[in-house]
């Protein structure tokens, strides 16, 4: 069985651990793709040591040259786009077309970020004193520890690794245990672009072991984490104990509001894509829809018809509309929440069970599920499910819709469907999410815009866009006095 290797100090290295787990195709559990090492803490520490050793030289490489390496990695990834998309679809279970979309998004991020090597600007700032000037420079921090989930196993590593490197940091990356094949292929693109040894390292393993050892390493000066809120808050606390900066992007429960003046067909298409696309396993998935009473019945009739037409199956096959949950544990979580929804008294409109027909029995498939008449206090309205399960709340007014949308611990993204400009702008002002959409699904994000959430979804500065460099750099403030004179009688 193919063993995945760590990448430490510029070399692919087999872990010394005896603990290994199979990498299983979630659409067909007879298909084993490889074997993942659950590396030791010592291996994580060794990777951090080597990243620390490489930092001194790497920070001296001019930012445009660091950016050029990331731009080259983008070209390499573009050449390997189809190969990596297929590996991603095979290993994680998202549709091939979705995997191709993730590849393009990742390439865009690398292009944008690589070019930023030429724009790592500070500011020149006028001083009160004559013949003096002040300016700022952006400097790297040291070693960045990057910890990622399985659901966007190309894009999320890329949107952390690329800016960390362009900013001049060295990196230790811990990918999710469920997606080692993809992580290996992503890393190889950066390596083949010409990174010096030790600048980028990758260690597979359990978060509480490898991830925790990385966060505690003295050379690590920044932690960027994406994953669940429960784990992310622990990561934030651990980083805070050391006084290092941390950025945690975590869970979501993204709402869509459909007002009575909405284009119902447009809203149904957007909600179906948001709720069932990528099997609901996106941080930006739509998991609540809030309907004004006048549109509710017409909307739900069309949505349930759309859900009923979805063909579940092999994500690599043409014609499949929805792939599996990523693993047995995620499948159990989704089925548990379906039971909770039924027990809470929500009205099941469609789905509500595991899908077993024919070849589906070998995979972790769940039917697209819609619960109607969900009340805000129900657990299926409040807790992240991370599967193709949509909770529908019916409301009487715009104000009630806003209250329901904001009645959540999470705040990643959201959307409203309406043709009313006044209520649209009130919504944009009052919605408590880090990103929002108008007349389009909750999904996606472009490379040049910041990405991230509020409340229990996000702590620390945003990822992506130009803002990401605020996280990966330190600002140094410089005062230059070119008078050559002592400043008599002045207080400093
Ligand atoms: P997870 O929290 O279980 O794991 C995320 C990563 O953290 C993995 O690499 C894991 O090994 C590691 N980890 C686990 N315990 C750790 C610890 N104690 N210390 C350090 N690292 C540790 O999340 P997951 O199941 O892989 O991903 C799904 C979650 O990710 C969902 O909640 C989803 O909403 C969230 N997500 C959020 C965003 C966003 O931008 N807000 C994007 C994608 C996914």
Image (tube, helix red, strand yellow):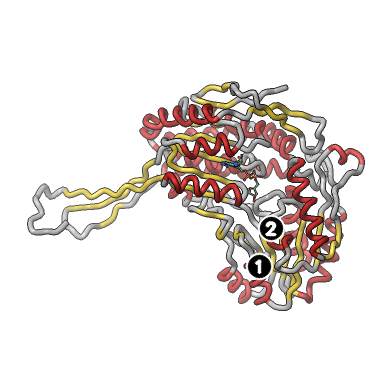
Q: Quadrant of residue 257?
A: bottom right
Left or right of residue 118, residue 419 in this image:
right
Ligand 1 closer than 8 Å to label 2 CB: no
Q: Residue at x 77, y 50 (%)?
A: 334
Q: Secondary structure at mark 1?
A: helix
316 versus 352 height, above or below: above
Q: Which residue is mark 1?
A: 405
> How many other residues sit within 10 Å of disc 1, few (<14), some (14-19) or many (≥20)?
many
Ligand 1 closer than 8 Å to label 1 CB: no
Q: Which residue is mark 2?
A: 383
Q: Which percent across, then down, holds residue 169?
A: 43, 37
Left or right of residue 125, residue 21 in this image:
right
Q: Secondary structure at mark 2?
A: loop
Residue 148 — which label?
A: none
Q: Quadrant of residue 408?
A: bottom right
Q: Residue at x 80, y 55 (%)?
A: 338
Alpha carbon distance from label 1 to label 2: 13 Å
Comparing 391 with 445, the one in front is 391
Q: Quadrant of the N terminus?
A: top right
Residue furthest to the right: 358
Q: Which circle's residue, 1 or 2, is located before the other in the chain?
A: 2
- Point out the quarter of the image occupied by ligand 1: top right
């Amino acid at each position: 069985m193919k063993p995945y290797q760590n990448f430490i100090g510029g070399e692919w290295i087999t872990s010394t651990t005896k603990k290994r787990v199979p990498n299983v195709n979630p659409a067909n559990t007879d298909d084993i793709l490889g074997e993942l090492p659950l590396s030791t803490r010592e291996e994580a520490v060794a990777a951090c040591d080597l990243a620390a050793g490489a930092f001194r030289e790497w920070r001296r490489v001019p930012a445009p040259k660091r950016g050029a390496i990331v731009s080259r990695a983008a070209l390499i990834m573009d050449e390997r786009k189809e190969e990596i998309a297929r590996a991603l679809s095979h290993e994680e279970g998202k549709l091939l077309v979705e995997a191709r979309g993730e590849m393009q998004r990742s390439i865009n991020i690398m292009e944008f970020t690589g070019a930023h090597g030429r724009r790592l600007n500070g500011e020149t700032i006028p001083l009160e004193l004559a013949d003096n000037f002040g300016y700022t420079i952006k400097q790297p921090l040291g070693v960045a520890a990057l910890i990622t989930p399985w659901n966007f196993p190309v894009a999320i590593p890329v949107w952390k690794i690329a800016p960390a490197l362009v900013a001049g940091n060295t990196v230790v990356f811990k990918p999710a245990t469920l997606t080692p094949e993809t992580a290996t292929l992503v890393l190889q693109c950066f390596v083949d672009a010409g990174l010096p040894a030790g600048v980028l390292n990758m260690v597979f393993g359990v978060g509480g072991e490898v991830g925790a050892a990385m966060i505690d390493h003295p050379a690590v000066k920044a932690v960027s984490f994406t994953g669940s809120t429960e784990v992310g808050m622990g990561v934030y606390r651990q980083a805070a104990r050391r006084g290092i900066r941390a950025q945690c992007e975590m869970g979501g429960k993204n709402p869509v509001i459909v007002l009575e003046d909405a284009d119902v067909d447009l809203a149904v298409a957007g909600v179906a894509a948001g709720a069932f696309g990528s099997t609901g396993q996106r941080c930006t998935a739509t998991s609540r829809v809030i309907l004004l009473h006048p549109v509710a019945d017409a909307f739900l009739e069309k949505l349930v018809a759309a859900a009923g037409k979805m063909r579940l199956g092999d994500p690599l096959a043409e014609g499949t509309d929805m792939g599996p949950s990523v693993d047995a544990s995620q499948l159990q979580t989704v089925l548990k929440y379906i039971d909770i929804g039924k027990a809470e008294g929500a009205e099941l409109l469609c789905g509500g069970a595991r899908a077993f027909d024919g070849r589906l029995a070998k995979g972790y498939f769940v039917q697209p599920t819609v619960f109607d008449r969900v009340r805000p206090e129900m657990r299926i309205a409040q807790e992240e499910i991370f599967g193709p399960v949509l909770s529908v709340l019916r409301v009487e007014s715009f104000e009630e819709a806003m209250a329901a949308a904001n009645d959540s611990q999470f705040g990643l993204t959201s959307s409203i469907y309406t043709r009313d400009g006044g209520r649209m702008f009130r919504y944009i002002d009052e919605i408590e999410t880090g990103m929002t959409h108008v007349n389009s699904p909750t999904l996606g994000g472009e490379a040049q815009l910041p990405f991230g959430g509020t409340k229990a979804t996000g702590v620390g500065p945003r990822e992506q866009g130009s803002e990401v460099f605020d996280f990966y750099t330190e600002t140094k403030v410089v005062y230059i006095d070119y008078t050559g004179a002592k400043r008599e009688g002045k207080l400093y």
